[in-house]
């Protein structure tokens, strides 16, 4: 597919809509908790099943974009996402809702990787750094719009566990229709003959050359920490916010989650001219600070400190996204990008699974407040290690396009 403003706009729109459904349910969790009598660990299990869907998608479908081209995979992902949102709207019990979240997770992995590759491929802008920034901004805006719209509708519209999904469902149908009207010329040359049978679907983790792997791991661990922090707010913030802020309800929690992502988008665009190493180091320092602020908030229960932790989390999250995508862009040629991007996203999404499961398990045993202190302390230590190691690592050069 040749660079085109129309194709770029629809791929960008499809990425936004495709990821809207991922965090849409976050402000609704207290409503599900009340309706279905759920514990904090039940909420984390529902949240994490989506992440297992994403991880499975990245592991088993990470190679299909390189083989079939981004557009068929993006179309399939949007169809699955729309179906998952529709199933969420009609879910009447936990198993059905978890199935819907699993479908959305599978679709999310397909959409984020294929749309990221597609935006680079059809971008009419020659500056790859600008396109990378637009890609991360589009992804983050989509993540933010879901909980914001869902929370606002759930606060004031009847039947919130149904009506909250309607806008995303309609927008998903429009995105599917638009993608099927785009010409399918997105196939790329294969680097090797197609694998036979089931072997083409088996997981294959891609890594850069040995001398560049430290850069990959620092970027990926930064994503692990940033994704973990956002997942904390997306899964349990509606529950622990009742102790820190005087306002409650889906609109408040939805606005909080969305504000992290909207501010993240602004911060991402504001640092697009920074050196990659500078972005990675500053993002890690910011993630240390936001975790320390959360510990302070949990002990003092001050709304102002909670607001400060939200802003600093957004800053660290935004810069971690820009830094990670910048490192992946420098490590690979376009023909290799899909595989390494999947590996990077796998590490990042593990940050949404392991710490959050531990947080839910601890919450049931020692209480939500103490579990929050343990979680934030551990993530602060991890981010501090990444910051120190990134400062000691040399700036990464761009890989040569021809070899």
Image (cartoon, rainbow, N blue to C red):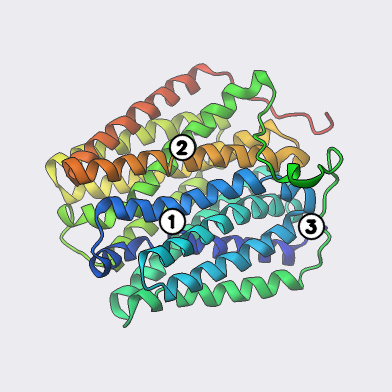
Q: In the figure, is residue 144 to the left or right of 398? A: left
Q: Position of residue 30 (x, y in %)?
A: 26, 63
Q: CA distance from mark 1 to mark 3?
A: 28 Å
Q: Return the disc, 1 or 3, that comes first in the chain's sequence.
A: 3
Residue identified by numbered label 2:
224
Return the residue nearer the eye: 226 or 313.
Answer: 226
Does any portion of residue 160 appear in the rendered image?
Answer: yes
Q: CA distance from mark 2 to mark 1?
A: 20 Å
Q: Position of residue 242 (x, y in %)?
A: 18, 57
Q: Return the disc, 2 or 3, that comes first in the chain's sequence.
A: 3
Q: Return the disc, 2 or 1, that comes first in the chain's sequence.
A: 2
Image position of 124 with respect to 287: above or below: below
Q: Residue at x 71, y 34 (%)?
A: 332
Q: CA distance from mark 2 to mark 3?
A: 33 Å
* Circle nearer the viewer, 2 or 3: 2
Q: Position of residue 224 (x, y in %)?
A: 46, 37
Residue identified by numbered label 1:
262
Image position of 363 with respect to 257: above or below: above
Res 76 → quadrant: bottom right
- Position of the N terminus, as image quadrant, is bottom right
CB-based contact (under 8 Å), mark 1 and mark 3: no
Residue identified by numbered label 3:
3
């Amino acid at each position: 597919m040749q660079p085109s403003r129309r194709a770029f706009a629809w791929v960008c729109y499809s990425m936004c809509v495709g990821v809207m459904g991922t965090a849409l349910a976050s402000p609704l969790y207290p409503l599900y908790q009340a309706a279905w009598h759920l514990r904090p660990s039940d909420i984390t299990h529902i949240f994490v099943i989506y992440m297992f869907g994403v991880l499975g998608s990245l592991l088993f479908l990470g190679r299909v974009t390189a083989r079939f081209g981004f557009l068929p995979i993006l179309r399939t992902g949007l169809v699955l996402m729309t179906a998952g949102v529709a199933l969420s709207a009609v879910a009447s019990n936990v198993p059905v809702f978890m199935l819907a979240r699993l479908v959305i997770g599978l679709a999310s992995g397909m959409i984020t990787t294929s749309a990221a590759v597609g935006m680079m491929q059809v971008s009419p802008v020659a500056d790859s750094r600008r396109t990378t920034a637009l890609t991360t901004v589009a992804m983050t805006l989509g993540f933010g719009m879901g909980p914001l719209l869902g929370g606002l509708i759930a606060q004031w519209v009847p039947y919130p566990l149904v009506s909250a999904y309607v806008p995303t469902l309609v927008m998903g149908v429009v995105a599917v229709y638009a993608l099927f009207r785009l010409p399918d010329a997105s196939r790329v040359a294969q680097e090797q003959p197609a694998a036979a049978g089931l072997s083409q679907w088996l997981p294959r983790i891609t890594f850069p050359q040995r001398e560049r792997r430290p850069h990959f791991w620092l970027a990926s661990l930064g994503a692990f920490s940033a994704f973990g922090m956002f997942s904390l707010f997306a899964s349990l913030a509606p529950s622990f916010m009742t102790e820190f802020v005087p306002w409650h309800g889906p609109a408040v929690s939805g606005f909080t989650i969305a504000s992290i992502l909207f501010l993240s988008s602004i911060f991402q665009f504001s640092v697009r001219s920074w050196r990659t190493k500078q972005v990675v180091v500053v993002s890690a320092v910011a993630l240390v600070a936001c975790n320390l602020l959360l510990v302070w908030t949990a002990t003092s229960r001050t709304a102002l400190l909670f607001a400060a932790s939200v802003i600093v989390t957004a800053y660290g999250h935004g810069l971690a996204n820009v830094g990670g995508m910048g490192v992946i862009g420098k490590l690979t040629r376009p023909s290799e990008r899909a595989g390494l991007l999947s590996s990077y996203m796998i590490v990042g999404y593990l940050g949404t699974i392991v710490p959050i499961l531990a947080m839910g398990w601890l919450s049931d045993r020692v209480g939500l407040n103490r579990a929050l202190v343990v979680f934030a302390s551990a993530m602060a230590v991890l981010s501090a290690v990444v910051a120190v190691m990134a400062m000691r690592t040399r700036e990464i050069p761009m890989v040569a396009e021809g070899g």
